[in-house]
Image: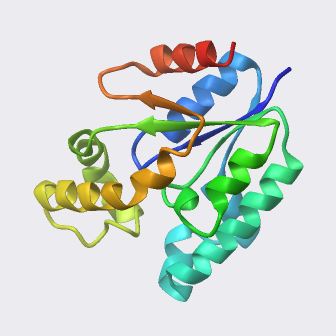
Amino acid sequence: MTKTLVLLGYMGCGKSVLGKRLAQLKSLLFTDLDDYIESHEKTTISQLFEKHGELYFRHKERFYLKKLLSECSHNVISLGGGTPCYFDNIDYVNKKEQIVSFYLKTAPKTLAQRLFNQKSHRPMIAHLDSQQDLVAFIAKHLFERIPFYTMAQHHVTTDHKSVDDLAHEMDGLLT
């Protein structure tokens, strides 16, 4: 039986890129929760943060997570980096029988290398000036978020692996 696959992990871990590849491999649809929110709210995540603050955004995120999971079956869904860490979102994902969750574990240094040139598009890190500051910020954030991320049913380390290798590794965990 095909299930909905939910990818979670810190921003920059590859949820969207890997999610698209995994969906292609499994002949499923792919949905990015942030894109889903932006299409329904008709604004960007950055603008939601800027205009209304993080708490407002987290409530909207929770609403759209539930909506998306109730509408979609047999999909690959990537969550925002903070989604599993607020309210009971990770419990909500894991209690659904038809969902399999994956934590994409990535080292802070790798994340910083991927994110540094994108930081203007990432409201949580836009204020950081150096890659060293970014590594420190990510390490602190990961320390806070790992208890939630590790509640995923499967953990996949992404460092030094290709997208194709990761997609096949995850597919292998489903059988």
Q: Is residue 49 left or right of residue 74?
A: left
How many numbered marks appear? 0
> Is residue 21 placed above or below 4 in the rendered structure?
above
Does 48 appear above or below 175? Answer: below
Q: Is 33 on the left-hand or right-hand side of 117?
A: right
Percent position (x, y) of residue 25? 66, 16
| Quarter assignment of residue 173 | top right
Q: Is residue 136 left or right of residue 58?
A: left
Looking at the picture, does residue 165 appear above or below residue 115?
above
Image quadrant in which the N terminus is located: top right
Residue under the image location 34 percent in, 64 percent down: 120
Which color scheme is applied? Answer: rainbow
Identified at 20% across, 43% down, the residue is 109
Question: Can you tell which quarter of the image residue 175 is in?
Answer: top right
Residue depicted at 31% across the width and 50% down the height: 115
Q: Give x and y (percent) for residue 171.
A: 62, 17
State the image coordinates of residue 47 (x, y, percent, origin top left): 53, 77
Q: Residue at x 21, y 68 (%)?
A: 128
